[in-house]
Amino acid sequence: MRNWLLPEHIADILPATARQVESAKSAMLDVFRTAGYELVLPPLIEYMDSLVSDGDAALALKTFRLDDQLSGQQLGLRADISPQVARIDAHLLAERTGVTRLCYSGSVVHTRPDGQTSSREPLQVGAELYGFAGIEADLEIIELMLSTLELVGVEKLRLDVGNVAIFRGLASAAGLRPELSQALFVALKSKDAASVASLVGDVAEPYRSAFLALPELYGPASVLERARKRLPSIPEVDLGLMQLAAIATALEGRVELSFDLTELRGAFYHTGLLFAAYAPGWSGELARGGRYDNIGRRFGRARPATGFSLDLRDLIRVLPQRDSARGICVASKIARAAAQTIAELRAAGNVVIIDYLGESAAALNCDRQLLAVGDAWQVVPFN
């Protein structure tokens, strides 16, 4: 007998867990709906140049590629839904000139897992807000992210917040060559202070000292005042710190907050605020988001954008249990005669199971049965 093994980091979701996942997904989408977010369903495959922008090496490496036998062009299996939603906002919904709120839910596929316990087929759920650059939009998205996690039972959330615009502003003001900027970005992201010191040895002041300070600027909201003292006053730094301070004020008492000026783990397309949610018992982030202004430029419309996403598979162990509804058993020998009654019961939301083998009520997960009583069909409890 053949042993049907699945590829590494790919797994089935069986009935009981599938009920949990689908119920949680439905509840999340309903939260989004009541906040004004409209559901979109992008396709699983697209042309590669739609899925991955030039220069996004990390996303390109994650994306499976295949040849389209109809067009002869290269297709990709999506590894991230956000670029697809940006295309929809910029191209298909271009007539909307105000704020557009969109949400989504679907599988993405990765060539490699993000971590040892990560799936290569995440169930990505997210929400995105286009058309408003103010910090209020970021706060709306953060609140939505926190509420979504709390909805499915995640407790004691911690929010880590950074701002990639601070690093980019410093790199631009210091006149760093692109290759040096990229190497420094990687070193800061991994908090490799020794590599940072080596890379900025020839950088002029005050920028050299600023880059050396960044790995030390993390902690509670008080770190923002230290950052103001240690970083040069340039527009990107001043605005970035002001935005972080606004987050601290707005969310004080709502969630445990931590700020990190080397929190640079967003996607290639992120441009400003970055935030990630953590909780005790999880080794990694449970949800991540940030600002990615002008992500739609390559699709013909550049405008402000912010959003978040999560992998529903990561949350399976805390999702509320959803027992399957107990059903009504119908012996197969009477099913045809009772067809209309069966249809009416199912239309009313009942589970009706046809018993072909004379199985037990427990095996069929039924607590009632349909019987002929006189000239009518009646649902009665099992004896």
Image: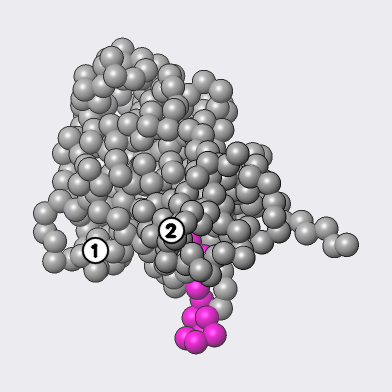
Cα separation between marks 1 and 2? 59 Å
**Which x, y percent locates residue 234?**
22, 32
Could you say whether the residue bearing mark 1 is in a helix, strand or loop? helix
For the point 36% across and 42% down, the residue is: 28
The residue most toward the top is 222
The reply, left or right, for residue 34 in relation to residue 265 is: left
Residue 90 got which mark?
Answer: 1
What's drawn in magenta, residue-wise? 68-82
Q: Nearer the viewer, residue 287 or 197?
A: 287
**Residue at position x 57%, y 28% in the image:** 283
**Where is 92 relative to 181, above or below?**
below
Tell which residue pokes out farthest to the right in this image. 1
Q: Nearer the viewer, residue 190 or 341?
A: 341
Residue 119 visible, this angle: no
Amino acid bearing label 1: Ala
In the picture, residue 224 is in which quadrant?
A: top left
Q: Give how far across and how far down residue 294 sits, in percent.
A: 26, 54
Decide: marks 1, 2 in contact (CB < 8 A)?
no
What is the count of numbered marks?
Answer: 2
**Residue 174 falls inside the magenta stretch:** no
- Residue 365 seen in the figure: yes
- Badge nearest the viewer, 1 or 2: 2
Left or right, residue 34 beside residue 22: left
At label 2, which amino acid type do we have?
A: Ala
What predominant SS class does the magenta segment belong to?
loop
Identify the residue position indicated by label 2 in the image: 376
